Image: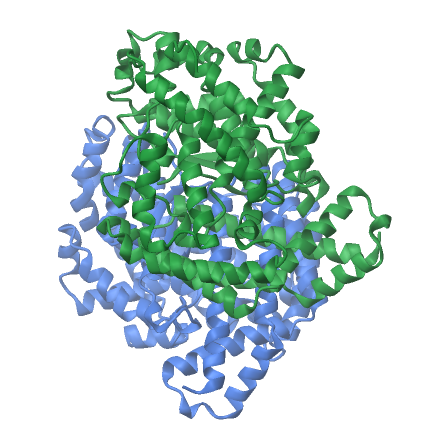
Chain colours: A blue, B green
Amino acid sequence: MNRHYQHLVNKLEEITHLNGVMSTIGWDQEVMLPAGAAEARAMQISALAGVIHERMTDPQLGDCLAELTNSGMDAFNEFERCNIREALRSYELETKVPKRLVQELAELGSRGHGVWVAARQDNKFSDFAPVIKRFLDLKQEWAQCVSPELSAYDANIDLFERGTTMATITPIFERLKQELIPLIHAIQAHAVQPDTSFLQGHFARDKQEALARQISRDIGFDFDQGRMDVSVHPFCGGSHPTDVRITTRYKDSNFVESLYAVIHETGHALYEQGRPHALGDLPVSESLTMGIHESQSLFWERMIAQSKPFCQHYFETIRAAFPDNLQHASVDSFYRAINTCKPDFIRVEADEVTYPLHIILRYEIEKGLFDGSMRVDDLPEIWNELMMKYLGIQPPNDALGVLQDSHWSGGAFGYFPSYTLGAMYACQFYNTLLREQPDTEKHISNGHFAPIKQWLNEKIHRQGRLYTPQELVQLVTGEALNPDHFIGHLKHKYSEIYGLTSV
Amino acid sequence: MNRHYQHLVNKLEEITHLNGVMSTIGWDQEVMLPAGAAEARAMQISALAGVIHERMTDPQLGDCLAELTNSGMDAFNEFERCNIREALRSYELETKVPKRLVQELAELGSRGHGVWVAARQDNKFSDFAPVIKRFLDLKQEWAQCVSPELSAYDANIDLFERGTTMATITPIFERLKQELIPLIHAIQAHAVQPDTSFLQGHFARDKQEALARQISRDIGFDFDQGRMDVSVHPFCGGSHPTDVRITTRYKDSNFVESLYAVIHETGHALYEQGRPHALGDLPVSESLTMGIHESQSLFWERMIAQSKPFCQHYFETIRAAFPDNLQHASVDSFYRAINTCKPDFIRVEADEVTYPLHIILRYEIEKGLFDGSMRVDDLPEIWNELMMKYLGIQPPNDALGVLQDSHWSGGAFGYFPSYTLGAMYACQFYNTLLREQPDTEKHISNGHFAPIKQWLNEKIHRQGRLYTPQELVQLVTGEALNPDHFIGHLKHKYSEIYGLTSV
């Protein structure tokens, strides 16, 4: 093998392994760390982050990449080319930004989180506004460094969903608004709302956990190469495709939230466990983007687990876990109850119909902030106006409005669109699966999930980073991202649930 | 502050924090890691170990230390001098050894463990013998590099119990043999052995865990700065004095083993939680040696928790946890049962009277191997002869004999003496405490452990690495290590338990 390429592989594998260590201590911080150890852990993370940054910006790595790219890429196969391309991308992302700016962003992110927590607690947006303002300045400067050819907001979006820009997103989001707002109105106007009373009550945690583990295992999570624990916010972490860790949280009063969080995180986990790590612990075997990752979690959570066939298969199992609560429920009433559509204030609790509007609102605000058409100080007002316009409700305070998400406190502008891109990808993938494997719904109703997992493994997970998200969607589904699939799915499903005649 | 000293502090703190990360992923490996992730974790650990080694051997660190030591140490206070001294020691330990030898030792340690596991399983010492032989060669060479002024075995002992050599250990161990072998004979000759039948049976795990947590907390473990989990072998780990993690294992058939493992590990943990980390995450705030660490675990396990006053305080609590099992037991019968003395094959299961003879046997073998008076191939025979001579029993196979410990498979020669040094230190410390705080036994019987913990905090834990073990023992107890305390304790206690008239 090319000596420079071997050198690159050694350096990239070391970075991957150190990132695996970082990921483990990050997981440990959320799941295991004693309360008193926060300060020590922060210093440990900072020391390791310093080492990883040093490795990622190592001038020897730069020289090696220059040698490889100058020598022409024809000598390399597609996996090798991918590793070189990805390494170059991340080397440039790390080295194009002056150290002063890196440090200022890191410090603001660290401080910003605390400011946000306090502001949300005190319900006082004006305390948090200076953090957003400063971040906007820094992120504009950062964008100018890393992608001077892009507008600043596009450069930020690119960090989470590479290759996707406002030019793609804006018309799709306009279309979604056009279709979903009337659908939500129609649902709300419908006289009979689903009965959800049997989802309230007391649900023993050990039963919740046993049920969640069973379903996670059934759909394909490999507990020999992963684990499931409890944390404040559910997430999927871990250090390697052979060490994938999902978490959830349990409420005595609500088993659906925890169960569907586990299914969601299992979707992420199947992607991680399905990565082609036999190609080495290298960029080519990494997962692709936030949007594609979210497509995998939402695929299982929404397309599979919120479907009628899934309810048909599991209803008796779920009723057996909570016999007192569900004694008068049926497959149909359960299916309708977990698919209730109702505008509310909090994004993370939103159903699949209203969720995109929460995202579109944030996208429009970020866009407005970056292009100067909106002022930070006006955000609470803008937020509430858009909530009224899109969902017909008015948050009673900023904690339930503009202060609800942590993203901006860490400078993650451009992240939000990934959620809805993921939802649309998920639906488009699912429709392709239905076309290619027409027995899918029968399989689901029989609890036979292996063909579905295999299809995702083959089409998406094992592709690693060989393609851009746009290329992958085209390859898998035969067309570019097309919101019709998502819109059609929602209209069809909710018309049926709510008995709407025309939407 | 001196510029060079500040530079040193920065470098040492970074190393401490990276070691804290390493410690966390080591803990994770024992407690959390999915079975399928062993290979990935090995690579992560190797990458991090490489970084830490690089930092510890950084020529800039060497230059900085040279500047500091050349400029005379008078300008520094005792804490600063300690940091410089300790940094120099570890820098020299890391840099005096050629890289080839470091790598060969690491590889042999890694391979040796697997060879040992298989040899023990197959009960075939000859498969393991080549590993020991190679380690002896490498460890002789290593000793010549790091401490040419010491004999090779002394250099190895120094790694675990610095400042202690065969010249100190041999006469003390001779004395122990002289006193303990007759004591064990007398105990065995005694007609009535304690009734231990009520310690057999079924003991629910949740009760065992609740009891262990209660007692660990009572004696002073701070669960806000630590945690307790389950692993195959009990240990005390964690990443920082604010993040101390103990483990145990539960057997349904035996609660004493698990409970006393927790108390033992709590002893280690109190040392870690008591370290003077306000002095910085620097060598001065580290724990001292293996022997001193073991003195802290054995202090709580043996001197406190195997005492009559401790049994008086906790017997009713323990009986309440296992009412069916202990309904006919009493404080006295419980005390006698947990202090049964009986020669057996396995070191880690030995009681406090026979334990030192397991250690002395290993010490004499290591000594013989290093001075050439024993041959590796003869070890099974030598082992069995010494077992017969010291404990009057003959292991039926090598798995219960020479193959029982993992230490040699990793090259840890010179480690074993620390266990019995620790036991003797523990006893000497305890006698000092009794002299200084005559109410100690009354406090124990009232469950009032705070004064004991405070005494250990002040006298030992907060001293960090300011003193050598020899200086510390002298400072705390007013005399050098004196085996009379240990011998007197055992004779007194076991004469009483077994009703011996003269030993």
Q: Can residue A177 be seen here? A: no
The residue at the point 49 percent across, 68 percent down is A14
A420 w.r.t. B448: above or below: below
B188 w.r.t. A428: above or below: above
Q: Is residue B145 left or right of residue B210?
A: right
Q: Residue furthest right?
A: B75
Q: Picture coordinates of residue A448 (x, y %)?
A: 15, 54
Q: Is residue B292 left or right of residue B259?
A: right
Q: Picture coordinates of residue B472 (x, y %)?
A: 67, 34
Position of the N terminus of chain A, as image quadrant, is bottom left
Q: Is residue A255 left or right of residue A239?
A: left
The residue at the point 29 percent across, 50 percent down is A223
Q: Closest to the observer: B218 or B285?
A: B285
Q: Can residue B209 be seen here? A: yes
Q: How many marks?
A: 0
Q: Closest to the observer: A255 or A93?
A: A93
The residue at the point 48 percent across, 36 percent down is B419
B170 w.r.t. B35: above or below: above
Q: Residue B376 falls in which quadrant of the image?
A: bottom left
Q: Closest to the observer: B198 or B147?
A: B147
Q: Residue furthest front?
A: B373
Q: Picture coordinates of residue B459 (x, y %)?
A: 67, 28
Q: Closest to the observer: B417 or A253?
A: B417
Q: Picture coordinates of residue B126 (x, y %)?
A: 28, 56
Position of the C terminus of chain A, as image quadrant, is bottom left
